[in-house]
Amino acid sequence: MTSPRIQIAPSILSADFAHLSRDIAAVERAGADLIHIDVMDGHFVPNITIGVPVVRSIKTVAHCPLDVHLMIAEPDRYVDDFAKAGANMISVHVEATPHLHRTIAQIKSHGIKAGAVINPSTSVTALDDVAADLDFVLVMSVNPGFSGQAFIRHSLDKVRRVRQMLERVGSSAPIEIDGGIDQTTAAEVVAAGASILVAGHAIFGTPDAEAAMRALRAAAVGVAIP
């Protein structure tokens, strides 16, 4: 099976919300593949971020596809609105919906990519019955809610197990990983089988997001930066 291309998805959770257009433009100049948008409701996770109107506004300035990660209770109620606002990919947590198969189908009905997310304490087996239906799987390598957390090491083994599960059902769906991704962890997660790397603090928490974006990609593919 051909190895997927490594994609970098800067997470605007760590960007300057007063200058989102500027920050998005910076990472796009550096070759960002996706713009990762964390939607949090203060119920499913202990934080509140942004909603549909902001996603709609981002769509008017971003050139990269929008990767919308719903960290919310009852995601089925909002999938249609986020799809119409311009999401190109939507992922939902297996822990947040009792009817995951139906939710995945609902996302796909809009002609966009559908993904399932598993938290650090959630077993990979929670995806067994929908694995063949997924366009991608998102593995959380921190407990969701806040940017800048330390990488949870057992996530590497979880990524390997997700890849094995996908291969069993004949799927080449990419594995996305989110949490603690920086220049020290990027190569490890790629070696484990992840090909979409979400990074927030490692990019936007630096004085030069454009340079940090390039350095992260170099680290992911094993190229030294002089």
Image (cartoon, rainbow, N blue to C red):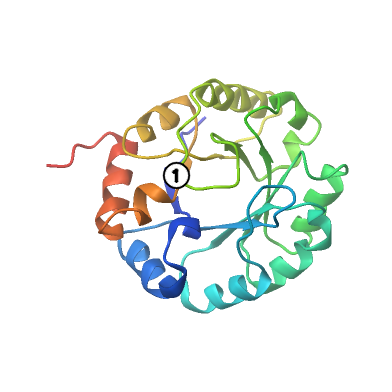
Residue appearing at x 70%, y 57% in the figure: 41
Q: Nearer the viewer, residue 130 or 206?
A: 206
Q: Is residue 116 above or below residue 51?
A: above
**In the image, 45: left or right of 96?**
left
Q: Which image quadrant for residue 86? A: bottom right
Q: Considering the numbered disc 1 on the image, is that residue within a helix, a strand or a loop?
A: loop
In percent of width and height, residue 112 lies at: 67, 60
Above or below residue 137? Residue 76 is: below
* Label 1 environment density (alpha carbons within 10 Å; few <14, some 14–19, many ≥20): some
Q: Residue at x 64, y 76 (%)?
A: 53
Q: Which residue is mark 1?
A: 148
Q: Residue 74, image x and y in percent?
A: 82, 53
Question: Does residue 219 lie above or below 36 as drawn?
Answer: above
In this rendering, position of residue 52 left or right of residue 74: left
Where in the figure is residue 137, as x and y percent of width and height?
A: 63, 39
Left or right of 109 in this view: 145: left
* Residue type pointed to by label 1: Gly
